[in-house]
Image: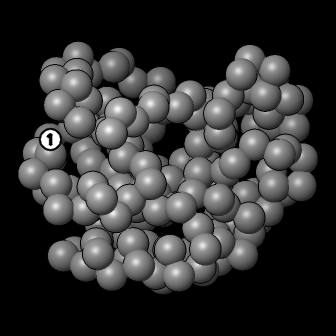
Amino acid sequence: MKRRIKVAPSVIAADQARLGEEVKRMEKAGADLLHIDVMDGHFVPNITIGPDVVRALDKITDLPLDAHLMIAEPQKYIRAFSQAGADYITVHIEACEGRAREVISQIKALGKAAGISLNPSTPLSAIKGLLKEVDLVLVMTVEPGFCGQKFMLSVIPKIKSL
């Protein structure tokens, strides 16, 4: 089965003071969904937004929302992001601590699309057994935690092999 690459601009790169206007620009530019980077200061060194911002975004756009949980113990927050309006919930294989299948099941039980993400240094073999269970695969092309980093060309072969 041929999978389609979707365009999902990240709201972290938007002007946060004008987030509503920025979302409308993303819609007009043809975004397939909105990517929302959620960082906790533990799994990654930065802190960003929580369920309240997802809830606010859900009120102003019809685009699907992908909550990318770059957080420790994502299973504790899946319900909150689901209730806030996330359509996709993407977790890092590295944060699931061997319970990725259970976390994916938790997401799907809430009626949401499940995504799995892997850091640039994590081999594809880490998610190979999960590919049929997830709706989205996010291959990180930067080290997670900060926006504006240089694209890591070394990750392209990993993307191609998916």
Q: Residue at x 74, y 17 (%)?
A: 29
Of 95 and 63, the residue lying toward us: 63
Q: Relative to 10, does residue 69 appear above or below in the rendering?
A: below
Residue at image point 50% right, 74% down: 108
* Coordinates of residue 105 in the picture (x, y in percent): 41, 79
53 vs 106: above or below: above
Render colour scheme: one colour
| 16 and 70: which is toward the camera | 70
Residue 78 drawn at (x, y percent): 54, 75
Query: Which quadrant: the N terminus?
Result: top left
The total of numbered circles placed on residues is 1
| Residue 104 shows up from this direction | yes
Residue at point 76% right, 37% down? 16
Q: Quadrant of residue 152?
A: top left
Tell me residue 76's x, y (percent): 48, 83
Q: Where is residue 38 in the image (x, y as percent from the top left)?
A: 54, 55
Question: Splitting the image into 4 quarters, where does residue 32 fall?
Answer: top right
Q: Please indicate, yes or no, whether residue 47 appears anywhere in the rendered image.
A: no
Give the residue pinned by disc 1. 121
Q: Nearer the viewer, residue 57 or 101?
A: 101
